[in-house]
Image: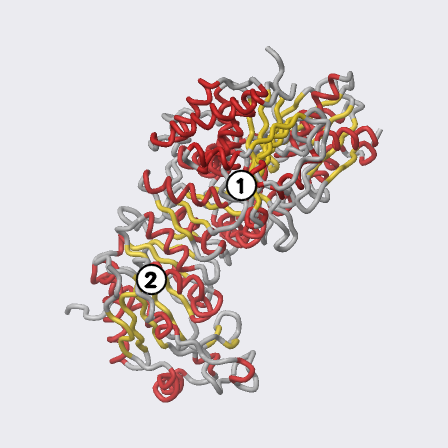
Amino acid sequence: MTRINESIICAGSGGQGVMLLGKFLANAGMTLGLNVTWFPSYGAEVRGGTAHSFIRISSSAIASPVVYLPGTAIIMNRPSLDKFENSLVPGGLLILNVSMCGQRPERDDIDIVEAPLTEEAVKLGNIKVANMIAAGIYAARKKIFDKELMVSIIEKMAGTRKELVPVNVKAIEKGMEIAGSQDGG
Amino acid sequence: MGNEACGEGAIQAGCRFYAGYPITPQNELTAYMSRRMEGVNGTFIQAESELSAINMVFGASVAGMRAMTSSSSPGISLKQEGISYLSGCELPAVIIDVMRGGPGLGNISPSQADYFQATKGGGHGDYHMIVFAPSSVQEMFDFTYKAFGCADKYRMPVMVLADGMLGQMMEPLEFDEDMKPPAVVSKPWALTGAENRDAQSIKSLRLGSGEASLERHNEKLQEKYRGIEKKETLVEMYRADDAEKVIVAYGSVGRIARSCVDSLREEGEKVGLVRPRTLWPFPHEDIRRLARGKVDFFVVEMSAGQMVDDVRLAVLDDDRVSFYGRMGGGIPEEKEIVRRLRDKG
Amino acid sequence: MAKTFTRPASMKDAMTHYCPGCGHGIIHRVLCEVIDELGIREKTVAVAPVGCAVLAYDYWDFDTTEAAHGRTPAVATGIKRVLPDRLVFTYQGDGDLAAIGTAEIIHAGARGENISVIFVNNGVYGMTGGQMAPTTLVGQTTATTPFTRRPEKDGFPLKVLEMMSVLPGVTYLERTSVHSPGEVVKTRKAIKRSFQTQLDRKGFSMVEVIAPCPIYWGLTPVMAMKRIQEDVLKAYPLGVVKEGSERI
């Protein structure tokens, strides 16, 4: 088996579902039998309007759940881009929500997938699923999680609120489609 | 989440009384207990202060119940009064400390600067708590569960010393939902009313002489502590057998140091790890045994250097013990520890 | 010939350490009489304070624990929640209850804890040597108010019952005294009513008993009783302060 060592930052503003997105990715990794950690920013930082969580998914034991140099950054708003763009490792993946980010990334040594995630989510009928479009993009690029696995995690996390499942599945599909159309290679 | 794992560990251990007071980064534990106690017919109280919370636990313990409170560093400073009384009265209780940066209000980032107040008897008088040091969400659960058994067995307060990183992080947790609580020991000393027996009291004031003297009481406590030192010390020795350099670290730093050992071993360096899993009793003997070889010790903590004192006492050769610490909520990175270790030669 | 005056069964056959003319002995006795009368000695768990009454367990023949200074209501809360069918009461002085333990007593009342509180108000710290208490009267000389209690420097006396009376969880509050046989009888009745309130699961109740401390008042026992009548009761009027609660 190939060694997996994913380090991810999900960042955005409160209400954009960046914490939930992080838990979703960690849950998917756990279901594959991998070591996972999820670690939130919290307290004073949360009240500043931006929030982020760190996720590690690894085939070996995880030392620290804190991610200083992410392999992937999922960025949902502009302050988060300012904060984390430079910390991405060379060759890393940047998933950027251009709907909430009036500026382009400056790096040219990373794989960038840009899409108006908020607008796409609105088109799908629920602004809150922008985070799951990002999850779809991540999955298509990294090829660690297949769609079937992600659907099962959505079902698990939705619990009794089954009505939320279809729109989230659509969001995943949308994300995979966006990733396919922007083949950064 | 680590905080919730502690809560579930307590519930599985038969804890049916919890009192707490809000403080970050342990709030999820208090919230978890407020939900969970409802379902098991237990008692949850949000107290008016940490002082009240620990004393409500004192009362529940007087009545014979498995009881717990939790807080973070500034709140633990307040609880020290109650912990001293629990120790003096020989009452079982479990206290979770999810450490944050200090002194004072400090910040809400992870820290290990409560080592002294946890292991050295942070309140007044000669006493100790058994102090468990988890380094994963799994150990948050396991040690909290275990703490109740130890508390009842030895009739004393037991602490689980975690930090903001362990409290806030999520990682997989496995436990058997049908698990049994630690063996219930009978508590003939509990106050439930003087029915079919003489009236009895629980107190820490000792003004008597001879067998009833405070000095004799302290001697008995110390005898108990010596027994615990022999029986309850827990330590993880990781790749330490043939090591020339050994990192000593606990809790969050312990898990980071473990990865340092792996990466240094891959490069052919003979490095090992000693990770104390109980901080009191401290694994002096295990470290002393290693120190008989030509081993150098490198202690890493998220403090200005607290556990390092115990390592020095075990090694008894200060030239072979070096230290690196981060303070005020700083978390050392793997690369940082490796670089510092190499700098020390 | 039948004995008409005996030691209550709930009281141990012991000499107390209290000073001559102290009020604690009287209050202990009527408290134990009430416990006997209600037949609840075997179901009682008491919490002793830090203060002169810290050794109460040497005199009471029922289960008693001791609390850290002022934390008495918190300890009682823990016991009562675990043992809801036992009679749980605290016995606290004015330093314990009205100074260091103010937060604990107010919040026990706010929660409507189903416990009883016997609050002995003698206006000084006795155990530590007669210092000013929160309840010390304006103009009273103590070890720490050598020029008398002056409001501009030392503030005003705390009226705990009046303060507690606004709390919906508080069911019954009465102030009594032990300065005369008639008042001792009323104290006994009030303690009984407080215990009955708890046994009926009606919530928090407290009896404040005005008591003499001849030693630190610098008076003979008889003069101390007279001072209660003439001075103390002006600041702390006797009677029921609250009955019945707004709680559901």
Q: Which chain is mark 2 on?
A: C
- As helix, strand or loop, the secondary structure at mark 2 comes to loop
Disc assigned to residue C13: 2
Q: What residue type is labelled 1?
A: Met
Q: Are marks 2 and 1 on the same chain?
A: no
Residue B204 at x, y percent in the picture: 48, 54
Q: What residue type is labelled 2?
A: Asp
Residue A158 placement, left or right of C146: left
When asked about the image quadrant of residue B152, the answer is top left
Dot 1 falls on which chain? Answer: B
Left or right for B336, reference C88? right
For residue A162, the mark is none
Circles 2 and 1: CB distance less than 8 Å?
Answer: no
The residue indicated by pointer 1 is B159
B36 lies above or below C94: above
Query: Where residue C2 sits: x, y (%)?
Result: 15, 68
- At 48% from the left and 51% from the top, the residue drawn is B22
Q: Secondary structure under badge 1?
A: strand
Q: Can residue C117 be seen in this view?
A: yes
Work out how far the residue at label 2 is from the one at label 1, CA to CA, in angstroms: 41 Å
- Towards the viewer: A59 or B121: A59
